[in-house]
Image (spheres, grey):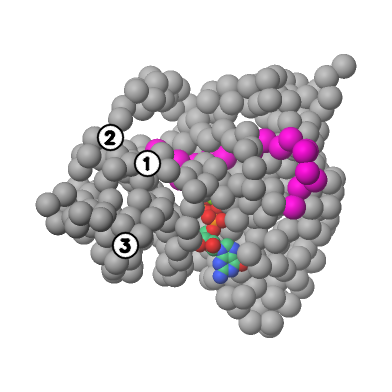
Amino acid sequence: MTKRIPTNLITGFLGVGKTTAMLDLLRNKPTNSRWAILVNEYGEVGVDQAILEGDSPEQIEIREISGGCICCTSSILFKFALSQILGSVQPERLLIETTGVGHPARLLEELRGPHYRDRVDLRATICLVSPTDFITPPMYESPVFRDQMELADVLVLNKADTTTQAVQEEFLEWGQKLYPPKTLVAVTQKGKLDPAWLDLGFNPQRQAKEPLAHESTKNLPVRMDQALQDFFQMPSRGQPLRKPSANNDACGWIFHPDDIFDEDRLLTLFASQPKVTRLKGVFHTQEGWFVIHRVENRTTEETTSYRRDSRIEIFAQGLEGGWEEYERRLLECLIREDAKTPND
Ligand SMILES: Nc1nc2c(ncn2[C@@H]2O[C@H](COP(=O)(O)OP(=O)(O)OP(=O)(O)O)[C@@H](O)[C@H]2O)c(=O)[nH]1
Ligand SMILES: [Mg+2]
């Protein structure tokens, strides 16, 4: 009989620290235990796989599905990747990161359904919450945010370093009153999750309050042709690939690996964009390769060993000049050939 693979969903809104948490779990996993990661990115240009690849303690099986939520637009691509993981990779554990705007209900249903239940041993769904989202009343109006919290077995306030003790206590008190009761409510920082939480049980009684949240996108045509086309497209120097999302609320770019960015110009550009909800990218700069994040008006930068290309994904609404103008500004951050010194 095939072994059922222990599987967890890591959910949470944009930029709360899901990938950071997965990296921390990978660093602390038992040596020689083979894990696989499936990451879903809403934007067309996946960045999380690059971040995971560039920072994982060892070679790890990662599959990324970008360009929509795996619960709707990209569900066929999800099934394909999952079957491949279950069939050929056969990991000892599978972690699935949903998109920050993803609605986990249909995905959980699918994983519990007849097709996967003999192969997937679904365990606790862990939802991370950021203090800013927790204390921002409009977030409770967001169906996706509400159901991510509703469907979680383990609810964790991350980024404790960015908030007060009072907010942390308020979160614990609020989380412990939710019904059906959460298996665990906790506070952490830097995505630090106790690996034992992964083996807590999954409670099938948890119901989505907003099951139709993604209904409008459920029957969008399968995007196989786009996926294939993307596979064969390559950027050339100074001419990145631009990939806006289907409803234009996000856009991604892939740059040739030999395009070198001026780090200061990039950071200045990102700091001057109040309408950007979330930005993440990997950049080849004159100082080396960096992962840059912008979330909640904070920019952070870390080195990475990823080298394949520079790539960026942005969530923004109402950016002046639209994506074309943004691309022009990104291109202005490139170091021109004739401006390079012989040592570059
Ligand atoms: N200050 C602080 N920053 C954190 C913490 N955890 C994660 N971050 C930072 O938050 C940013 C986003 O982290 P990610 O792990 O990429 O978040 P994510 O939820 O995977 O983001 P998406 O996949 O885009 O939704 C990064 O700059 C992290 O370094 C924390 O506990 N405190
Ligand atoms: Mg992520």
SS at mark 3 in the image: helix
Q: Residue furthest top?
A: 1
Where, quadrant-wise, is the C terminus in this rendering? Answer: bottom left
Q: Is residue 29 magenta?
A: yes
Residue 215 marker: none
Left or right? Give the position of 102 relative to 320: right
Q: How far across and how far down the image is residue 136, in percent?
A: 53, 70
Residue 263 marker: 3
Left or right? Give the position of 151 relative to 304: right
Q: Which quadrant does ligand 1 occupy?
A: bottom right
Query: What amino acid is at disc 3?
Result: Glu
Q: How far apart in space, not on screen, are marks 2 and 3 (Cα)?
A: 20 Å
Q: Is residue 20 magenta?
A: no
Image: magenta residue range = 28-47
Residue at position x 63%, y 37% from top? 60
Query: What amino acid is at disc 1?
Result: Asp
Q: Does residue 166 appear in the picture of this structure? A: yes
Above or below residue 16? Residue 70 is: above
Above or below residue 253? Residue 167 is: below
Query: What amino acid is at disc 2?
Result: Pro
Label 1: which residue?
309
Q: How far apart in space, not on screen, are marks 2 and 1 (Cα)?
A: 9 Å
Label 2: which residue?
235
Residue at position x 54%, y 23% from top? 76
Residue 186 or residue 153, whichever sits in front: 186
Q: Quadrant of residue 233?
A: top left
SS at mark 1 in the image: loop
Whichever of callouts 3 and 1 sits on the residue coming sooner in the sequence is 3
Q: How far across and how far down the image is residue 11, in percent?
A: 63, 49
Contact (Cβ within 8 Å) of mark 2 with mark 1: yes
